[in-house]
């Protein structure tokens, strides 16, 4: 049975999507893991990191994205077909052969509002947060890891991600504004776990876009690692780097070293994947 890990943060632009996509590619190419990626963000960034925009357009036109799942949930229809929606063998890196994707859609923006209304009216069991968990249940045994990329808020779509997850990671840039909301997320997830009667484990905070020449980044990283209210900062971190920024684009690469860069970036991502898998083995 797969270990299901959500990537969340209240702050936008901290590297959630980059970390989620990178983890999947490294888990696959370096560690032979079967991974299902789930893109819950209507910005569709993870989707267009893993498949071409043309392909996404095709999937979207044919209702083969998560917008259909949530639309069914809200309207009581049954158009979503899990086996058709799972896009197999994604990623523009040749060596990555075992990553599948449930794509997102711009239409999720509207679904978010309708899901909120459902939650407020109390019309659905579990407050309308169990749709994703139920939908992916039939395929969970086929994967070693399911990684869920969430939008930068704790709205109803993110709650669907959390309800499907065993654990979560919180990426953050090590500066004041980015780290500000971390305790709030931890509390919110804890309360949500109580609400659904299940622990959602914190695997750790992931430091991203680290600049070694920044005094703020150095001091914030030190502070985070000492802060007792932040339970755990993973030992590995990801530097800010042009090649990692370029990795957001869907362009063909032969290997992960070429895609992410081999001046430390490859090793950093590989060791982050090791950290996450180790934490997951220990805690789940
Ligand atoms: N380590 C890095 N070095 C350089 N650029 C990076 C790095 N990580 C992410 N970026 C870039 O920073 C921007 C934000 O990253 P990303 O989309 O991964 O963040 P996010 O937290 O998912 O954002 P959102 O909250 O909008 O979903 C993107 O342009 C991405 O390419
Ligand atoms: Mg994102």
Image (cartoon, rainbow, N blue to C red):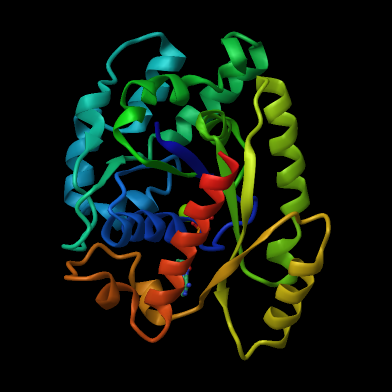
x 32%, y 57%: residue: 31
Residue 201, position as x, y percentages in the image: 63, 40
x 44%, y 26%: residue: 132
Residue 138 position by quadrant: top left
**154 lies left or right of 17:** right
Image quadrant holding the N terminus, namely top left
Residue 116, position as x, y percentages in the image: 59, 24
x 33%, y 29%: residue: 141
**Residue extending furthest toward the front:** 282
Residue 76 position by quadrant: top left
Above or below: residue 98 compared with residue 125: below
The foreground one among 269 and 210 is 269
Residue 183, position as x, y percentages in the image: 77, 51
Residue 172, position as x, y percentages in the image: 62, 63
Residue 262 position by quadrant: bottom left
The foreground one among 86 and 23 is 23
Image quadrant holding the C terminus, namely top right
**190 lies left or right of 127:** right
**40 lies left or right of 59:** right
Above or below: residue 263 compared with residue 66: below
x 46%, y 61%: residue: 274
């Amino acid at each position: 049975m797969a270990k299901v890990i959500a990537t969340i943060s209240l702050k936008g632009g901290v590297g959630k999507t980059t970390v989620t996509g990178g983890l999947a590619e490294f888990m696959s190419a370096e560690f032979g893991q079967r991974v299902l990626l789930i893109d819950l963000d209507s910005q569709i960034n993870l989707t267009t990191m893993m498949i071409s925009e043309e392909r996404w357009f095709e999937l979207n036109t044919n209702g083969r994205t998560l917008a259909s799942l949530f639309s069914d949930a809200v309207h009581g229809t049954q158009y979503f077909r899990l086996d058709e929606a799972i896009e197999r063998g994604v990623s523009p890196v040749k060596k990555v052969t075992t990553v599948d994707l449930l794509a997102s859609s711009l239409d999720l923006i509207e679904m978010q509002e309708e899901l909120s209304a459902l939650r407020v009216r109390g019309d659905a069991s579990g407050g309308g947060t169990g749709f994703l968990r139920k939908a992916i249940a039939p395929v969970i045994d086929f994967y070693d890891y399911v990684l869920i990329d969430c939008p930068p808020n704790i709205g109803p779509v993110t709650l669907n991600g959390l309800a499907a997850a065993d654990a979560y990671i919180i990426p953050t840039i090590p500066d004041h504004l980015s780290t500000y909301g971390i305790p709030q997320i931890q509390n919110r997830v804890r309360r949500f776990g109580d609400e659904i009667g299940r622990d959602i484990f914190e695997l750790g905070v992931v430091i991203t876009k680290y600049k070694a020449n920044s005094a703020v980044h150095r001091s914030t990283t030190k502070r985070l690692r000492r802060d007792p209210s932040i339970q755990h900062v993973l030992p590995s971190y990801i530097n800010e780097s042009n090649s990692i920024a370029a990795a957001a684009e869907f362009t063909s690469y032969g290997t992960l070293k070429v895609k992410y860069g081999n001046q430390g970036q490859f090793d950093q991502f590989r060791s982050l994947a090791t950290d996450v898998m180790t934490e997951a083995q220990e805690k789940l």
